[in-house]
Structure formats: C-alpha cells, structure tokens
Image: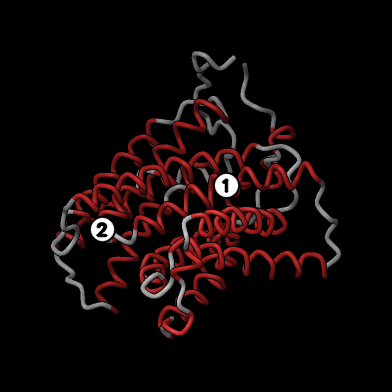
Amino acid sequence: MSPPDRAETGVPASKDVPRLASVLLAFAAVYLIWGSTYLAIRWAIETMPPLLMAAARFLVAGALLYAWQLAKGVPIPTRAQWKAAAIGGAFLLVGGNGAVVIAQQWVPSGIAALVVASVPLWMVLMDWFFGSRVAPSVRAWAGLATGFVGVALLAGSPGVGAGGSEELIGALFLLVAAMSWAAGSIYTRYAQGLPEPLSLVSMQMLTGGTILLMLSLAFGDLARLDVASISMKSSLALMYLILFGALVGYGSYIWLLRVVTPARVATYAYVNPVVAMLLGWALADEPLTLRSLAAAAIILGAVVLITTESWGSRGTGGRRRVRVPGNT
C-alpha cells in the first residue's frame, strides 16, 4: 500500500508550504514556551491537585479559543469533527500531558526530560508504520540518535535525578505519556476531515479537558482541593500554562503537525530540556556545568541535522518508500 495521498491526509501540498519565517516562529514558541512549562507545572501542582489543574488549564484555554473562533464566524464543527478531535485530545492531552502532570509529583525534571525525549523516536516509528509508510532517512536517524545521547548526558548532570521507587513509577507514567503523545500527533497529522488548526486546537482542549476533569473527580481531586490554600505562585503558574503553554504553545504545535514532517516537529522534545536547564539555573539556582553545556551543544546539533533536511520537502523528501509488514 502506498503512502496516503496529500489530499487524503489533509497535509498541504508543497506549493502550499507556509513561509519559513512562520514555521520558525512556531518552532520558537514550542521550543521556548514548552521548555518553561515543566517549571510552571511544578509550581502549579504545589497547591493544586494535578489532574484538576490540568483539566482547568485546557478547559479554560479551549473555551476562550472556541468562543473566539465562533465570534470570527468559523463554521460550527460537525459531529465527525468533534469525534476526531476527541480522539486526538485523549491521546495528546489526557494520555500525554495528564501522565506528565501526575509523574511530576515524584520525578525530577531531568529524568522527566530524558523519558519525554523519546517522543521523537516514537513519532518517527509510528509515522513509518502507520502514517507515511516511508522509512526515515539516514540523516533523520542520525539526528534522533544524537539528540537522545545529548539528553541522556544532560539527565546525568549533577542535581538531576535522585532515584527511588516513586521515581520509577513516575518514569513509567512518563513513558506512557511519550507514547501517547506520539500516537496523538501522528493521528492529528493524518486524520481526514479535520477543521482548520485553531478550531481543532480548541476542540481538542475542550474534549481532552473534559476527560481530565472526569478522571480528576473519579480520583477524588475535588475533595482534596482547598481553594484557600492555593498560593499566588500556583495561580500565576496556571495562568501562564493557560495563556502561553496551551493557547500559544499547543496552537503552534498542532499547526506545525500539519505543515512539516513529524521528525522536525518532534525536535521540541530535545530542545525543551535545554530550556528547562537554563531556566533552572536562572530562576531556581540550579547548577550549570560543563557537562550540561556539552549536552546542550549535542542536542542543538541533532536539531540542526533533522530540521535542515530540505525545508521545502514535506513528503518523502527523497527518502525510499518501504512497505511495512502487516500494514497492507
């Protein structure tokens, strides 16, 4: 079976590829904003139940964006579009973000960065087996491997990871999160009949946030919520996660999924730990060592390898088509 036609996947043809400046701005938003959300999540869940916080984040952001879309006169989504958005939202925001929020109760940011950095590998493999059916290029594999080595080096820096059984449980949650996020990303890239990106973002946040809210209620988060004890730091962190992490960051990510290859989009998972490291040094007085700087340089080199592979190419990119066994 040949790879899906662009008209079938909803991915624009090469002549419709947006200007490089727009793509770079979207990447900058995902790289920098999402690199800072690890710290924001940590602060938010200090005085808020994790799942309830995540539900509030996406429900508020989704409602604001959806209302804005309706005010602009965007057509009301169909039932089929809501169903597709709910599937993507479940993978991305419930399985992906929700598991990260739970894990950050126990897992240091360095270990979280290492496990979440497996997202690019899962995305490329899932795109190969279930999406484009196109084997990644040698250059893409080299970039993925290099980036993972860099993140592993970063995770081994002083002050990163303390061990323990709770950390192991958290790491398992993060592995589930990485695989779920990759699956949701590939689904969103190839699903047919989706609305335009901003409408899709709002719908995924509303459906994903609703599922997170139901889970939080099922696990008793509401009973543990003490509104009076919510700190100003947690409140500001939640506002940041809504306005920047959800609206700007997630909106940019979903748009990028529709216009560039999964390998390029997934590079955010390599850059985010570097941003988190620098913010930790600047805001939390965490150590910045030569090892950390070397890891950052390796990670940036990996990003260059992956992202500079012919910006205008969005399909096979000159890569060899490979039939995947069992997918006919």
Residue at x-position 32% and y-position 44%: 172
Image quadrant occupied by the N terminus: top right
Q: Which amino acid does label 1 sit on?
A: Ala
Report the Cα–Cα distance between label 2 and label 1.
26 Å
Q: Where is residue 115 in the image (x, y as percent from the top left)?
A: 31, 47
The local secondary structure at tag 2 comes to: helix
The local secondary structure at tag 1 comes to: helix
Q: Position of residue 170 (x, y in %)?
A: 30, 51
Depth check, front residue: 15 or 37? 37
Q: Relative to 8, is 55 above or below?
A: below
Residue at x-position 69% and y-position 70%: 64
Badge 2 density bin: few <14, some 14–19, many ≥20, Cα 10 Å = many
Residue receiving disc 1: 90
Res. 138 mark: none
Q: Relative to 263, is 328 above or below?
A: above
Q: Can residue 20 be seen in this view?
A: no
Q: Can residue 292 be seen in this view?
A: yes
- Tell me, yes or no, whether the two marked residues, 2 and 1, touch with CB atoms within 8 Å: no
Image quadrant occupied by the C terminus: top right
Q: What residue type is labelled 2?
A: Gly
Residue at x-position 65% and y-position 47%: 86
Which numbered mark, 2 or 1, is in the foreground of this view?
A: 1
Depth check, front residue: 134 or 96? 96
Q: Relative to 284, is 192 above or below?
A: above
Q: Position of residue 42 (x, y in %)?
A: 36, 69
Taking the image as shown, residue 315 lies to the left or right of residue 11, namely: left
Q: Position of residue 71 (x, y in %)?
A: 82, 70
Res. 110 mark: 2
Depth check, front residue: 8 or 202? 202
Taking the image as shown, residue 319 lies to the left or right of residue 158, namely: right
Residue at x-position 55% and y-position 62%: 55
Q: Earlier in the sequence, mark 2 or mark 1?
A: 1
